[in-house]
Amino acid sequence: TQLLEQSPQFLSIQEGENLTVYCNSSSVFSSLQWYRQEPGEGPVLLVTVVTGGEVKKLKRLTFQFGDARKDSSLHITAAQPGDTGLYLCAGAWGAQKLVFGQGTRLTINP
Amino acid sequence: DAGVIQSPRHEVTEMGQEVTLRCKPISGHNSLFWYRQTMMRGLELLIYFNNNVPIDDSGMPEDRFSAKMPNASFSTLKIQPSEPRDSAVYFCASSFRSGGHNEQFFGPGTRLTVL
């Protein structure tokens, strides 16, 4: 049983479309992080959200932390082939220990 | 500035053999984490160290797994004896623990295949 459930697990869309991926849990986290991982590499941190209801933007990416700090979403506007990768959410208890979701494997087709 | 360095990048071994994975964290970082990634289970934390001291090893699957951090610039993860189900990508990550929500920097991983 995964503590963090990500959906969808796989998503393939055309360049220019919008998409949202979700990260859900029954646990409350002190913060939640989103990472992107490309083949043959380790995950790279995109953003950390800390406050319930917080929204952060990173260019075409918008991250939201749920009010109860149990869930999060990542929205990509006008997706580009360079957005292709594995997107991982990770919940934190305290400052250090992370638990990761299974990831959403995103493919953007030109 | 070099990131987290892991070696080897790929390891193929036979069941029963000892495997040692190595990690050099980013200079100045004081926390080090070992993770394992598989398709079935995703990315799992195995163990982490603060200031070279193991803090939480609850993710280490069995006694066959052991990790050491003899100094601030080096850590090893050892599997003895190895089994086919240990096949996975093993990541090392480091961070600077400052009391806030610390960013972890991951190495490129070691892909282990146990035949």
Image: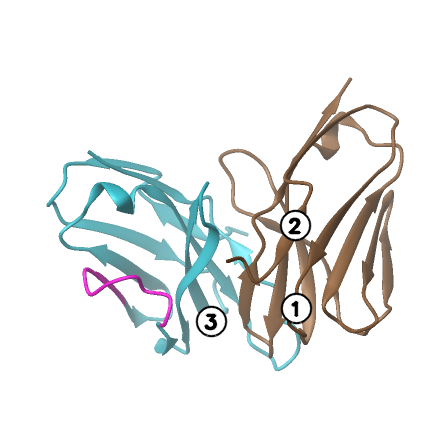
Is B14 placed left or right of A17 in the picture?
Answer: left
* Amino acid residing under circle 2: Gln
- Between B104 and A16, the one lying in front of the other is A16
Query: Rounded to the nearest whole Å, what is the CA distance between mark 1 and mark 3?
Result: 28 Å
Main secondary structure along the magenta-highlighted residues: loop
Give the CA separation, mark 1 to mark 2. 13 Å
Which residue is most to the bottom? Answer: B99
Q: Which residue is mark 2?
A: A6
Task: Identify the magenta region.
Answer: B58-67
Apparent colour of chain A = brown
At which x and y percent is residue A17? 87, 29
Q: Are marks 1 and 3 on the same chain?
A: no
Q: Where is residue A75 drawn, in percent x and y?
A: 83, 46
Membership of A42 in magenta stretch = no
Per the image, the residue denoted by label 1 is A26
Query: If the image is split into quadrants, where does the C terminus of chain A sit?
Result: top right
Residue located at (36% from left, 75% from top): B52
Residue at image position (48%, 52%) is B43
Given the image, on which type of amino acid does mark 1 rest?
Ser
Mark 3 surroundings: few (<14), some (14-19) or many (≥20) residues within 10 A:
many
> Along the horizontal axis of the image, is A65 left or right of A90?
right
Question: Which secondary structure lies at badge 1?
Answer: loop
Q: Which chain is cyan?
A: B
Residue B58 position by quadrant? bottom left
